[in-house]
Image: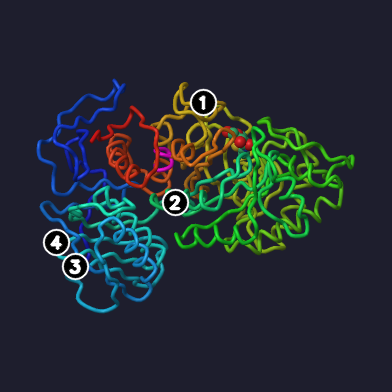
Amino acid sequence: MTSVPTVPSRAPRRPRLPRVLAASAAAAALAVVPGAPAVAAVPLPTASPAVAAPHVVPAPASLRTLPGVSFTLTRRTRILVRPGADHAGTYLAGILRRSTGYPVPISRTGATTGSIALSVTGGGGGEAYRLSVRRDSVRLSSGTPAGLFRGVQTLRQLLPPAVESTTVRPGPWGAPGVEIEDAPRFAWRGTMLDVARHFFTVRQVERYIDTAALYKINMLHLHLTDDQGWRIAIPDRPRLASYGGSTAVGGGPGGFYTERDFAEIVRYAAERYMTVVPEVDGPGHTNAALASYAELNCDGHAPPLYTGTDVGFSSLCIGKPVTYEFLDDVLGRLAKLTPGPYLHIGGDEAMSTKPADYAEYLRRVEEIVRRHGKTLTGWADIGAATVPRGSIAQYWQPAKGSEEGTATARAAVRQGARLVMSPADHAYLDMKYTASTPLGQDWAGLVEVRDAYAWDPGTLIDGVTDKDVAGVEAPLWTETIVTDHDIDYMTLPRLPAIAEIGWTPQRGRSWNDFRLRLAAQGPRWAALGRAYYPSPQVPWPTS
Ligand code: TNX
């Protein structure tokens, strides 16, 4: 590919007006959300443009528009796959066929003209890709299949929102002419789903993976165990799942994944170049395990199952050898089931474990994780103990006013760990947006879309800089979250905000630009069958 002169993606490219972006946008629509006084009603152009301006989330590292140029997908468009591009080609064809109704054949030979040409150039480069949309063709290339897949997500967003529909829609299917060169800021761009407080089926997890993949999320952290439920079958300890997994917050029926179920989630995530990070929390947050096996308790008595929402009341028995046999068994199984390098051992809110016991627990669990060939990952509380260089500490406390949280994070960094940034007052998807949000919690404050977006993981904690940061992660705790609708409503639009923080260079980000690009996602979510919180901070199109 020829080298492309680029400008930073935040350079003004269009009037800063809320505009309806869908090709189908009705002329008379007003870009205003009912009951949203902050957004002025702006009359829209009377004719909708044939193709929308590019509104991509996360913003590419560099994007140049080609004025007057566009590509139109037709009944004759083919996907041309070079070696290594088959998977991305099949995935893209699946999306295009179901909404356009066109055959979209995949071919390995032939001319680029009239096609979407996908190629893996080799030579690595991680998730970086180049995308060129011209009148006669679309060319997407990357050094790796993963980068190609990320580029496909960008191409999806250049096409009209109806491309996300699961049923055939009329089109037209235009994409604006662009030259994009893109690469992520951070290697870890994650989201966490708490399947312990409420259980979510394999199908629900896969649906969530699909939402996240659209925004180039590449890490799926599954919070598999907590006081209220144990969600992964461990063959030699069947009661963990059959009994410990038999309920949930509020007393529902719970559930658990068999090893096959878990393998299916891993497979589905891997197809989207997403690494699963399984978490078994301890020494606190362990009531479900303690209830399942009496021997795990210091006094030998199993507590009852727990369906409330308190934290900090349970602890594994630090002095008993069976505790470490149990951990070795559980972590060993998960290490085998998980191709990714990380085992997340929790370590948060161990309020019922003495500090000396906590340090001893970490020493033992670190040794087990290492023996199973994995990288120690835990909530940043683990910085209070000894952690090896190269481990991952996930910062979760609010950015503001959390001496203890920042101290343990700094202690982890001093030992050579890197941080995944999930500050609760910015990145927690279970915080309410406003006081009247029907779902969620507010212990870390209210988190509107702008709060989720406007922070920098490289400057949040004094003494911690970009090089100490592995990336960002948006956790969805599910004490109040039960259905797919609940997941969607808390995730959209905040997960895309965190995804952009993880992907886009800090200098390429601005709230005013983001909110316009975010607005263009609304019709995509509608086409995909996803609910979302219609934040008054975002000028959603109303057609
Ligand atoms: C704190 S954050 C927790 C979770 C809760 C969450 C609710 C963290 C490491 N622990 O146990 O589910 O708050 O927002």
User: Does the magenta-highlighted stretch encompass residue 493?
Assistant: yes
Q: Label 2 is placed on what type of residue?
A: Ile
The C terminus - image quarter: top left
Q: Identify the residue at horizontal 39%, vertical 68% (top origin).
A: 87
Dot 4 alpha-carbon crowd within 10 angstroms: few under 14, some 14 to 19, many 20 or more: some
Q: Which residue is mark 2?
A: 217
Task: Determine which of the numbered discs, if any, sits on residue 135 in the image.
Answer: 4
**Where residue 526 sits in the image (x, y, percent)?**
33, 42
The residue that mark 1 highlights is 445
Classify 10 Å Cα crowding around label 1: few (below 14), some (14-19), many (20 and above): some
Q: Nearer the viewer, residue 394 or 136?
A: 136
Tell me whether circle 3 and circle 1 mark residues in contact (CB < 8 Å). Answer: no
Quadrant of the frame with the N terminus: bottom left
Observer-nearest residue: 88 or 283? 88
Residue at x-position 20% and y-position 72%: 112
Q: Which residues are magenta?
A: 492-496
Which image quadrant shows ligand 1?
A: top right
**Disc 4 from disc 3: Cα separation:** 14 Å
